[in-house]
Amino acid sequence: MRVELLTVGDELLLGDTINGNAAWLGRRLADHGVEVTRSVVVGDELDVIVAAVGSALERADAVITTGGLGPTYDDLTRDALAAAAGVALVRDPHLERRLRERVAKAGRELQPMALRMADVPKGARVLPNSAGSAPGLRVELPGGVVYALPGVPFEMRAIMDEVVLPEIARIAGPPAVARRTLRTARMWESVVATRLAEVEAMDGVRLAYLPDPAEVKIRITVTGADAASRLAGVEARVRTLLGSAVYGAEDESLDRVVHRLLAARGETVAAAESLTGGLIAAELTAMPGSSATFAGGMVTYATEAKAQLLGVPADLLAGHGAVHPDVAAAMAAGVRDAVGATYGLAVTGVAGPDTQDGRPVGTVYIGVAGPGNSHTVVSPKLPVPGAGPEIRAVIRRMTVVHALELLRRVLMGLDAEGGSGEAQADREDRD
Amino acid sequence: MRVELLTVGDELLLGDTINGNAAWLGRRLADHGVEVTRSVVVGDELDVIVAAVGSALERADAVITTGGLGPTYDDLTRDALAAAAGVALVRDPHLERRLRERVAKAGRELQPMALRMADVPKGARVLPNSAGSAPGLRVELPGGVVYALPGVPFEMRAIMDEVVLPEIARIAGPPAVARRTLRTARMWESVVATRLAEVEAMDGVRLAYLPDPAEVKIRITVTGADAASRLAGVEARVRTLLGSAVYGAEDESLDRVVHRLLAARGETVAAAESLTGGLIAAELTAMPGSSATFAGGMVTYATEAKAQLLGVPADLLAGHGAVHPDVAAAMAAGVRDAVGATYGLAVTGVAGPDTQDGRPVGTVYIGVAGPGNSHTVVSPKLPVPGAGPEIRAVIRRMTVVHALELLRRVLMGLDAEGGSGEAQADREDRD
């Protein structure tokens, strides 16, 4: 079954909004073995939407549209589907009543324009929206079926999961494809790809490399007979070739792995951050229940704060500046003791775009202080990804990954500097 | 001049990557008065890429492709452009030499597959890539021009800004359109749109509403004669209609506004965070030079840490739990004093998906402690956006915005609860 996506909205063509909905839909459908063959974005123009729906249904069996179902002047998807089907828009009394009730319950006034959301192309099926005001629509056209969804992400996802995906999965049948995503940290994409060349050459096996700053996800797709059982063998081979660089699979992000390792031992970690400014703590509090293993954090951004809040010796800072491995070690021990955690994790370095204390952009020291006097400090050479203000965010993100990975290695008793082949880049550098 | 975007890559259709490049390109071109009329994503299939380039050039004057220029098996854009032009791929000796030098300088081995990046469709122009290995390409076809760029974001942006945009801007001529984006916090999108209905009705004026959690950006586009001068009048009217909800324009994010206000008075702020887990501190350290106004932060995620690190009275926590306005006030004063800042900013609340201390998801208290005993606490009723694990991230983000907005209002002497009409939602709710 071939599905195309059609995203409607000027704001997407103007670049004001990034198309997260299309990515989510592509993934969800792929998980159900349904291939998205094309994804198109058009603006808020009636004729263009009608034409795009038509040409999509020449190529595919179904089209999923997002956007254009709101109440404002530029919401034209309902009108476009009615035009494509050659029918009129009809006011649905049930939808109107529900809309009025919803607005009254929130203690607000119904704006007349909002009633457009109770209009339905004659003959279309309404797809109930439990999370918002505008319902989805299912319209049958000569070339196939159109599922029209709201553009608001969680409303779109609710209707997809509750109504549309079950119907599509029923039509598509069971998938003859098996997928698995493995996650690595600190290994350059080119090194990963070169090591996995033998796997790439296997019949019916496809690898996709998805780089992020200091991380590479490898999506393994196995097609054909016995796809699921063959996948297990392929995964094992990939893990052998990449070694300890592989830290998890699927949605098992580094923070979740760290929480799991700490929780299993009844231990906690506290974070002291300089250049990352709170991003490590934010990562370690993203998961519900993280307070069991994340004890607290400090953002000691200015040099003085490192002495004042963490007890980093003032003469160390005076002699070497804030960007120094001994400072990272002292910060880690300091936050561990100040917060009362089992481990302290600390970072200090230069995020850019300016140098600091004479140290170049990308200089980073990461320290982990464990029970007693145990400590580990690493100094990854972060590749500086181009120039300009955006390197700051990339270097901050790379540092977060390196920090969580160091903590994982310490907790697992792995070599602190191992598993990278060479230092990870956030760009597709090729050997 | 009409331009279409063509993004190449299976990972985009599978939803593993979100199409940030298309958004950036759309915005960059719009800033130069060039309209992106369609944005298409296709997979790594030679025939599909060739066909997509052809149909795009039937509709538009130029196509910008991203992706498919790397060295691996699925990088097919070079081949597709050669096929579309009916020419062969030719090895460029200059590119090959540069590639070998680059790899040798980094102390690594040249992988044979990498030499594909030195192949060029005969007659095409190479667009130098100062930030990476794979050059861009410019190919003239019967229907128009194709600019092929790497998929790696900062490499793509470098080639666009250095080579392609100047050429396109020259061809397109000066734009007869003027744009301005205003930024608001805490006001529901539907309230914004209803208040601006009179502006929407003006000739040659178009408004786009771009909602984010607790923020709405309004993109004003004025077309026609005297667009720039008419824009000034439209902006003034919008600001009058929305009042103090407007906090800035263009890229002037809330954190930058806060930094500017503090820097002008030589003052600083420290942040104490519970549910936001470090995101406020990360926001306030995103800007280079932020250490002048951001003094430091603490992530007091567990209840005990609020007493231990911030001096929140233990009996207050025992009596009311951590989710209470007095706790927010005590946290704000505590971090202000512990770090030694002019202001303390604190948040405590329930991010979900579980309730806490009997308080429902979305209950949040935000406190600002100023010099002396001045303090302000607000309790925004955050609308809970659906259900499921993703509400946690949305509620955290909304809280960050509400916190920065409260600080802005305190610094500007504005009513702490004003400027919202009604509480801001992160979804398109309609009155």
Image (spheres, coloured by chain):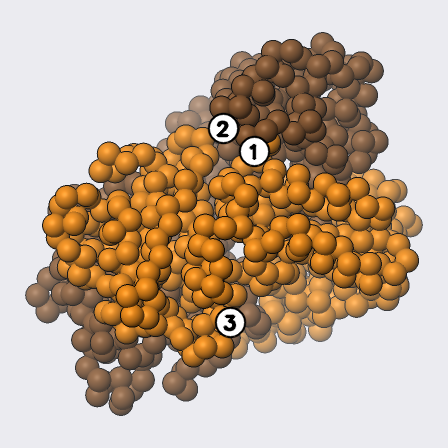
Chain colours: A orange, B brown
Q: Which mark is residue B106?
A: 2
State whether discs 2 and 1 lie on one chain: no
The amino acid on which the numbered mark 1 sits, given as a three-letter code, is Asp
The amino acid on which the numbered mark 3 sits, given as a three-letter code, is Arg
Q: Nearer the viewer, residue A275 or A421?
A: A421
Badge 2 vs badge 1, beta-carbon distance below 8 Å: yes
Give the CA separation, mark 2 to mark 1: 10 Å
Give the CA separation, mark 3 to mark 1: 33 Å
Percent position (x, y) of residue B292? 19, 45
Query: In which chain is the residue bearing label 2?
Result: B
State the residue position of label 1: A429
The residue sitting at the left extreme is B372
The residue sitting at the bottom extreme is B319
State the residue position of label 3: A260
- Residue shown at 45% from the left, 50% from the top: A417
Percent position (x, y) of residue A422? 52, 41
Q: From what the image shows, is residue A98 above or below residue A348?
A: below
- Residue shown at 10% from the left, 62% from the top: B371
Q: From what the image shows, is residue B69 above or below residue A244?
A: above
Q: Secondary structure at mark 2?
A: loop
Q: Quadrant of the C terminus of chain A?
A: top right
